[in-house]
Amino acid sequence: MDDFIAARSQMALSLGFHIIFSCIGMVMPFFMAVAHYYWLRTNNIVYKNVTKAWSKGVAIFFATGAVSGTVLSFELGLLWPGFMKHAGPIFGMPFSLEGTAFFIEAIALGFFLYGWGRFNKWFHWFTGVIVGVSGLASGILVVAANAWMNSPAGFDFVNGQYINIDPIEAMFNDAWFSQALHMTIAAFVATGFAVAGVHALMILKGKNVLFHTKSFTIAAIFGCVAAILQPLSGDISAKDVAIRQPAKLAAMEAHFETEKSASLIVGGIPDEKNKKVDYAIKLPGFLSFLAHGDFESEVTGLDQIPKKNHPPVAITHYAFQIMVGAGMAMMLIAILYFLALWKKQTWLRSQWLLKLFVAATPLGFIAVEAGWTVTEVGRQPWIIYNIMRTADAVTPMPGIAYSFYLFSAVYVSLAIIVIFMLYRQIKMVGKLYDHS
């Protein structure tokens, strides 16, 4: 395996693995805090059981996320020394603040896990909220650092030198808000549907129905609200990308020719050689509206961008289609669920609705992985957009392929361990809370 490909593959594997635990770490504590709040307000033992069960899951994912996140920090220096040499002083602030948020999260989680019966009940609940808030802050800060790679700011680039560095401006770059908003909502969608799907499966199996029904309701409401909001954040992101990274938008839509009243492409197989998309559904004017809020506006195509700066069109396009398709499916399920809550409450006890949630269990994380593929692959060939190429930042150290194989084995092992621990945790829930 070529060392450049190995370095990119290792980073992609690490990010793809870590992002799952990051999403859960950002969101699950809020589920836990809501269940805990209901326990304190109603004194219903089921909510206490739900809180304790979820807190153990939070601990498992926190530990795994800490390990995979630490590996990522080492990989940035190991695999991309050219990038870190110049970028470190500029966008180091969000990483430093993320480290602070991580330590606060760790301390608060320790207080919460070992605080049962030892603290004032509302202070104990508050420590759980702090776990969620600090986890959310960590995620937003890391996304701000990634946004800087897509929208470099806070420095002047003169004769190959980075001068007049302003870390605050770098952190609050033009892309940070749209990316942070989209990623935060995506984390709630993915985690909400995944957790709701697991509990829906347990309800269908007839195991601890009351316990799993309470759990399902909390997770489903979080996930469904986020799924309905997500297209709005997607629209903000699309308009932002259209202005800052026209090549990325063109790759996302396989938009080869600059034109007015550009068509939005649904599906299709990009043919880069002949500059067309086969078997696609085209919605005239909708890409112009998505990009600029006007059905007649001109949308820049790949023909206006030097070929050497083209992102990989097929990968970016397919990833974008998967993300949007999964998001739309979850939004439709969310609409059905809220319709059930509002008008058709008999649906809430129906198997077909629960089966929809079970089927949607992985959809949120599939969408997250696809979305990050769009973000990272769509920026290529740049590691710092329009400033530094990815090929110029990679390590000159030979033998990176062996490192890729080693890290792949580590991540596979971690995945197996986490699956085993979660499976054991679910079985323990069945034994402990069977009376519910």
Image (cartoon, grey):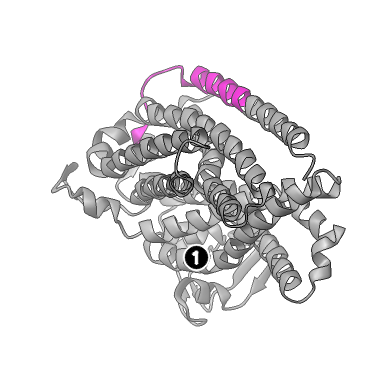
At 48% from the left and 27% from the top, the residue drawn is 67
Q: Residue at x 58, y 51 (%)?
A: 31
Question: Can you identify the residue that label 1 sits on?
Answer: 233
Q: Residue at x 57, y 76 (%)?
A: 286
Whether 135 is drawn above or below 354: the answer is above
Q: Report if residue 367 is visible in the image.
A: no
User: Split into 4 quadrants, where in the image is the N terminus?
Assistant: top right
Q: Specify whether 39 is left or right of 296.
A: right
Q: Which image quadrant is residue 382 in?
A: top left
x, y percent for residue 338: 69, 70
Q: Dot 1 lies on which element?
A: helix
- The residue lying toward the viewer, choosing from 303 and 96, is 96
Q: Residue at x 59, y 73 (%)?
A: 263
Q: Position of residue 253 (x, y in %)?
A: 56, 62
Mark 1: which amino acid?
Ser
Is the C terminus in the top left, top right, bottom left or bottom right quadrant?
Answer: top right
Whether residue 59 sits left or right of residue 345 in the image: it is: left
**Residue 279: image x %, image y %?**
72, 62
How many C-alpha atoms fall within 10 Å of the one at disc 1: few (<14), some, or many (≥20)? some
Quarter of the image where one finds residue 433: top right
- Residue nearest the observer in this picture, 325 or 9: 325
Q: Position of residue 32 (x, y in %)?
A: 57, 47
Q: Is residue 396 magenta?
A: yes
Residue 225 can be seen in this image: yes
| Residue closest to the eye, 436 or 421 | 436
Magenta-tinted stretch:
392-414
Q: Main secondary structure of the magenta part?
A: helix
Looking at the image, residue 243 lies above or below residue 9: below
Answer whether residue 207 is magenta in the image.
no
Q: Nearer the viewer, residue 400 or 235?
A: 235
